[in-house]
Image (cartoon, rainbow, N blue to C red):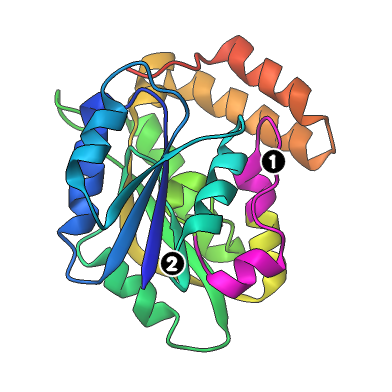
């Protein structure tokens, strides 16, 4: 069984859709939504679903801590880490199970595609970013949090889970995942929300996130990375 883990904070407009999309899959799964103290109706919406959906009240700050807390409670033999604004392709859970039928595959993720806006197609710059992101994923098996990374249960605990740092925990986990063994790239794209790119500007978002990654790889302290990121990009979401 797959345990899908979704961290949330004030995601009332989208969390119901995110959970329902997983429940509509033919593949058996449980959904653990870790709420970081939302001030809107996120928690109530999640609780209304009932089993196999569970609300977990986050005990420690940070997305890495949220993932680890839910993983300790999860019953599945496969863990899927999903952002509230990312959507799997049709039968995405089945694609994960198919990829892990090969015993030498320890985990993996999906190719990304940005969701088009209501006003029409996304800007050309955003499509270029998407294409570069897809090529990088295929070449290096590097799965950011938006790309619905998944891993076998035993592999997750063997590597120590998510690093509980203030920023870049997704990249730190991607590094761990690559070190574990062979990874599967599922070429049916996961839909990634472009809301932050479009609100802040595609080029600005690319420059900020790119600079954070360069500093992360150079060993800069996560506390500084968190300050830098939030200095230039807003933390709140629409």
Other-residue count near label 2 (Cα within 10 Å), few / some / many at <14 / 14–19 / ≥20: some
Horizontal and vertical percent for residue 74?
46, 60
Judge by depth and name the residue closer to the eye, 142 or 39: 39
Up the image or down, 177 lies above or below 214; here it is below
Up the image or down, 157 lies above or below 51; here it is below
Horizontal and vertical percent for residue 66?
54, 41
Left or right: residue 188 compared with residue 128: left
Please give the name of the residue rendered at 19% of the width and 62% of the height, measured from the top-left corner. 90
- Image quadrant holding the C terminus, namely top left
User: Which of marks 1 and 2 precedes in the sequence?
Assistant: 2
- Image quadrant holding the N terminus, namely bottom left
Horizontal and vertical percent for residue 127?
36, 39
Please give the name of the residue rendered at 71% of the width and 59% of the height, measured from the top-left corner. 160
Report the span colored magenta: 150-173
Other-residue count near label 1 (Cα within 10 Å), few / some / many at <14 / 14–19 / ≥20: some
In magenta stretch: residue 142 = no
Q: Which mark is residue 40?
A: none
Q: Which residue is mark 2?
A: 75
Label 2: element kind: loop
Q: Which residue is mark 1?
A: 164
């Amino acid at each position: 069984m797959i345990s899908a883990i979704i961290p949330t904070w004030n995601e009332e407009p989208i969390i119901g859709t995110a959970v329902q999309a997983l429940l509509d899959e033919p593949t058996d799964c449980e959904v653990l939504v870790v709420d970081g103290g939302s001030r809107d109706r996120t928690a109530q919406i999640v609780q209304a679903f009932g089993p196999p959906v569970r609300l977990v009240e986050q005990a420690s700050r940070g997305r890495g801590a949220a993932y680890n807390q839910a993983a300790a409670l999860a019953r599945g033999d496969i863990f899927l880490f999903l952002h509230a604004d990312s959507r799997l392709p049709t039968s995405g859970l089945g694609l994960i199970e198919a990829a892990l039928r090969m015993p030498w595959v320890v985990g993996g993720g999906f190719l990304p595609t940005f969701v088009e806006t209501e006003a029409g197609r996304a800007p050309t710059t955003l499509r270029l970013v998407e294409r570069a992101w897809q090529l990088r994923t295929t070449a290096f098996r590097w799965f950011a949090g938006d790309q619905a990374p998944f891993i076998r249960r035993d592999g997750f605990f063997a590597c120590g889970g998510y690093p509980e740092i203030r920023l870049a925990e997704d990249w730190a986990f991607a590094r761990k995942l690559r070190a574990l063994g062979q990874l599967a790239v599922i070429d049916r794209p996961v839909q990634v929300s472009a809301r932050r790119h479009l609100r802040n500007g595609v080029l600005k978002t690319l420059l900020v996130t790119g600079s954070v990654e360069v500093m992360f790889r150079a060993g800069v302290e996560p506390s500084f990375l968190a300050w830098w990121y939030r200095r230039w990009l807003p933390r709140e979401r629409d």
